[in-house]
Amino acid sequence: MQSALRIKTTVLPGGKIEVIDDTLQAGESVDVIVLPQRASTARQSAVDILAGAPGQRLFHTAEEVDTAIKKERDAWDR
């Protein structure tokens, strides 16, 4: 069995797609999967995604995290 074949092509008028490959035999049965390439949107970093989330981030700096952890640990000792 032949491995997957990946070909980029352009959709022709009438929504037609043409696939040409010398390794394909006339009369051979094949499966065709079409993955339209939409205009890509700009990728966001994880920090940008979190900043836009409802409630945003609890801490904004490493120092704020350290302070909160210290307060929590001090509360355990009481």
Image (cartoon, rainbow, N blue to C red):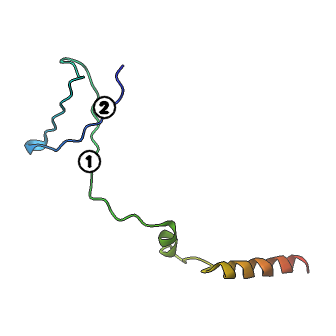
Q: Quadrant of the rendered structure where residue 30 is?
A: top left
Instruction: Label 2: state its secondary structure.
Output: loop
Q: Which residue is mark 1?
A: 36
Front of the two marks 2 and 1: 2
Callout 2 amino acid = Leu
Query: Which SS class for mark 1?
Result: loop
Relative to 37, is 70 on the left or the right?
right
Q: How many marks?
A: 2
Q: Which residue is mark 2?
A: 5
Measuring 76% from the left and 76% from the top, which residue is drawn there?
Answer: 69
Q: Residue 53 in the image: state x and y as whole percent.
A: 50, 73
Q: Position of residue 27 (x, y in %)?
A: 19, 17
**Vertical side of 59 occupied by 47: above or below:** above
- Please state if 55 lies on the left or on the right of 13 as rendered: right
Question: Residue at point 79% right, 79% down?
Answer: 70
Cα distance between the residues tagged 2 and 1: 16 Å
- Label 1 CA crowd tier, 10 Å (few <14, some 14–19, many 20+): few
Of the residues shown, which amino acid type is indicated by label 1? Answer: Pro
Q: Earlier in the sequence, mark 2 or mark 1?
A: 2
User: In this rendering, would 36 be left or right of 13?
Assistant: right
Q: Residue furthest front?
A: 22
User: Which label number is shown at residue 26?
Assistant: none
Which quarter shows the N terminus?
top left
The quadrant in which the C terminus is found is bottom right
- At a point 48% along the width and 69% down the height, the residue shown is 49
Residue at the spot 27% in from the left edge and 32% down from the top edge: 32
Q: Is residue 30 above or below residue 74?
A: above
